[in-house]
Amino acid sequence: MISLIPTIAAQLAMLPMDIDISPNDSGLPGIAQLKTIVGAIMTVGLILSVLALIISAIIWGFGSNSSNPHMASRGKLGVIVSCAAAVICGASVTLINFFWHVGQTV
């Protein structure tokens, strides 16, 4: 039993130590430009969500006024989808940060 203690101690010394790596914005060139591009894409996504909302509301109105239930339901679905897309675009940074912090606690 006593002869096993040096072997166990040697094996414990070979275990990897805690790794502490955090994201940095100076590791690669072009990170600032990439942040600008992602922000611009978020803006385009929000603008397209507003456009989809307007078009879907028009289709919903035409479907309701012309007694066309299929067109009205497609317009309603378009309104819901465009609002969901705007929520996801607007909350994307917060969602990613939330899950990043959840992942750091694992």
Image: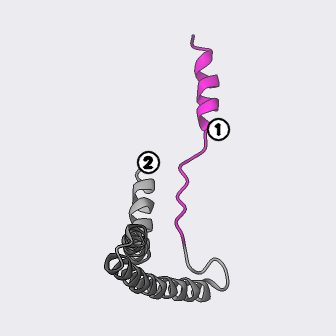
Residue 33, image x and y in percent? Answer: 61, 89
Dot 2 or dot 1: first in sequence order is 1
Residue 51, image x and y in percent? Answer: 45, 87
* Disc 1: which residue: 14
The disc at residue 106 is 2
What amino acid does circle 2 point to?
Val
Q: Is residue 70 above or below residue 19?
A: below
Q: Secondary structure at mark 2?
A: loop
Nearer-the-camera pick, 64 or 4 = 64
Left or right: 54 in relation to 48: left
Q: Secondary structure at mark 1?
A: loop
What amino acid does circle 1 point to?
Met
Count residues near mark 2 (Cα–Cα under 10 Å), then give few for <14, some for 14-19, many for 20+: few
Q: Is residue 8 above or below residue 82?
A: above
Q: Residue 5 sits in which quadrant?
A: top right
Would residue 2 be counted in the magenta stretch? yes
Give the residue at x 36% y 79%.
66
Mark 2 or 1: the one toward you: 2
Residue 28, image x and y in percent? Answer: 66, 79
Nearer-the-camera pick, 17 or 103 = 103
- The quarter of the picture where the N terminus appears is top right
Count residues near mark 1 (Cα–Cα under 10 Å), then give few for <14, some for 14-19, many for 20+: few
Which residues fall within the magenta stretch? 1-23
Nearer-the-camera pick, 63 or 57 = 63
Nearer-the-camera pick, 26 or 62 = 62
